[in-house]
Image: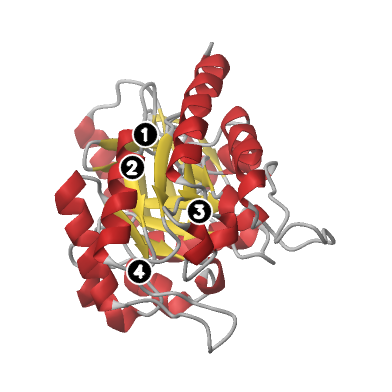
Amino acid sequence: MIVVLKNNTKKEKREQLIDLLKDMGLDIHVSEGKYQTILGLVGDTSSVDIDLIESLDIVDSVKRVSETFKLCNRKFHPDDTVITVGNVKIGGGSMAMIAGPCSVETEEQITAVAKAVKASGADLLRGGAFKPRTSPYSFQGLKDKGIELLLHAKKETGLPIVTEIMSAQDLPLFDDVDVLQVGARNMQNYDLLKELGHINKPILLKRGFANTLSELLMSAEYIMSNGNENVILCERGIRTYSDYLRNTLDLSAVPMLHELTHLPVIVDPSHATGIARMVPPMALAAVACGADGLIIEVHNDPIHALCDGAQSLRPEEYDELAKKVRLVKSAVRS
């Protein structure tokens, strides 16, 4: 349920109403927009007398929200959420560029890629330290050593870092990581999501390859309901009948998610396609349909990459793509 307050409502009257609603056993989520303030009522609202609340002189309207996701619902929070990472803004029509290798391999590799993507205008550096792999025999990442190398690359370039967390027990290793990524395989790892709700760091939440948008939003709700509202959604492709690409990039999810939620939405064309030459056209399409950012795999030697070399762009290819991204973004804005 949401309660829309009238413009210029005095703070003391608003607080009185909030206290009344809390006495009913409800949690109140306050969203102060440019033109109106919305109170999101979370909990059992069946006993709330809508007519009584609506009769108050500070209340403009009261509406029930039918969707099961509440905190990430745009009805609760009409204005776009903009998440700040260092000096980078993600959300609200931004175009955050996140780039780097699938896996951190060596200090030379991650530092070289970090310097290259920064020169091309990247805002954040991605790199996998913990790698969930389909085969138990595949490279699983350098783990804590990988995070150390990412932090070294951050020191060399100033780029905030994004890396994937697979288990809540590893949280202490991520104290200096700027953005924690939840991969597609862990999108419904609810114990992990709850723990991430207790920290004050941005969480990049990837959609599972067999999950609906409602399920993605409910996973975001798990994080937000535990106190952390800094969630970035990522469309990374879903499994369909396509037999030539790794996944099918569901770009229709971007405008749909923007309609449903106030959270930022970025796109991963690398995991979606699995083929380097397919990444640029899909990345540009993502920009055109309103994505708030891109996360793209870049490797200085893809042929010898320990993970996902086939979908990784070379630095010079990323540089060319970044220029086109800026042109498309400019055209869309105009």
Q: Amino acid at mark 3?
A: Lys
Q: Nearer the viewer, mark 3 or mark 1?
A: 1
**Residue 266 x/y as whole percent:** 50, 44
Residue, disc 2: 116
Residue, disc 4: 105
Q: CA distance from mark 1 to mark 2?
A: 7 Å
Q: Amino acid at mark 1?
A: Ser
Q: Amino acid at mark 4?
A: Glu
Return the disc, 3 or 1, that comes first in the chain's sequence.
3
Q: Nearer the viewer, mark 3 or mark 2?
A: 2
**Residue 63 x/y as whole percent:** 56, 41
Residue, disc 1: 120
Residue, disc 3: 70
Report the side of 18 relative to 133 (left or right).
Answer: left
Q: CA distance from mark 4 to mark 2?
A: 16 Å
Q: CA distance from mark 4 to mark 1?
A: 22 Å
Q: CA distance from mark 4 to mark 3?
A: 41 Å
Question: Is 211 or 240 nearer to us in this picture?
Answer: 240
Give the residue at x 51% y 73%. Answer: 186
